[in-house]
Amino acid sequence: MMATRNIAVVVGSLRKESFTRKVAQTLIELAPPSLRMEIVEIRDLPLYNEDDDTATPPAAFTAFRERIRQADGVLFCTPEYNRSIPGALKNAIDVGSRPYGKAAWTGKPCAIVSVSPGAIGGFGANHHLRQTLPFLQMPTMPAEAYLGSIAGKFDGARLSDDSTRAFLQTYIDNFAAWVDRHAS
């Protein structure tokens, strides 16, 4: 039997009604009981500036880092902006990676779901994020999730596409096993 694991869900889109956020919410709904998943907001993080990492860093930095440290794993859900990840997501990664040697991300098993209204499902964003994670020492689930043509797969907030729902169910179940195997 798997232990219950706390999962930080980091959504790269800041838009309240974004398809990426809707996908994250769907994954939270589909998660097995072994995962307790919660979105950790990145919208209020100031831009990372090493000058701010003094004895009293911005409160938003400290709160974000603590939320990530408390998690047993991380699920990244990201849209694709200009064939890469959004600046807000990169900023959150930078905030959580500092101060150097004390990264909140270290050792957290993770997975990536990329979302796009286009046909290739955020392939560029998925792979750019995937390039960053080894440096952060995050065991990254090898299975890839690209959700393309996403706009036609929702009826309001509800995922109405059965094949996408089935894919996400398999993905989140595999992620639960991945986290259980790699969480410290």
Image: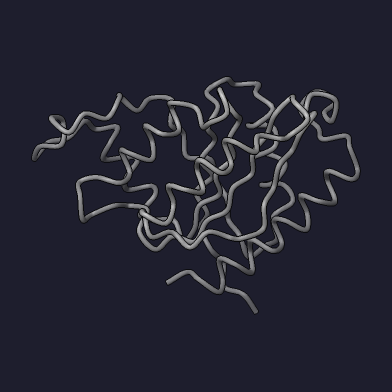
80 relative position to 29: left or right: left
Q: Give the farthest residue toward the left.
A: 55
> Could you say where residue 116 lies in the image, as x and y percent from the top left?
70, 29
> Could you say where residue 47 lies in the image, as x and y percent from the top left?
30, 24
**In the displayed structure, would residue 9 be above or below residue 44?**
below
> Could you say where residue 1 lies in the image, as x and y percent from the top left?
65, 79
Q: Give the farthest residue toward the right.
A: 162
In percent of the image, x 30 and y 46: which residue is there? 97
Residue 20: name its quadrant.
Answer: top right
In-front residue for pair 179/157: 179
In-front residue for pair 137/27: 137
Q: Give the farthest residue toward the bottom.
A: 1
In percent of the image, x 33 and y 44: which residue is there? 96
In percent of the image, x 81 and y 51: which residue is there? 167
Say how the picture is coloured: one colour
Count of numbered labels shown in the rendering: 0
> Could you say where residue 91 lies in the image, as x and y percent from the top left?
37, 32
Q: Quadrant of the C terminus?
A: bottom left
In-front residue for pair 128/59: 128
**In the displayed structure, would residue 143 be above or below residue 10?**
below
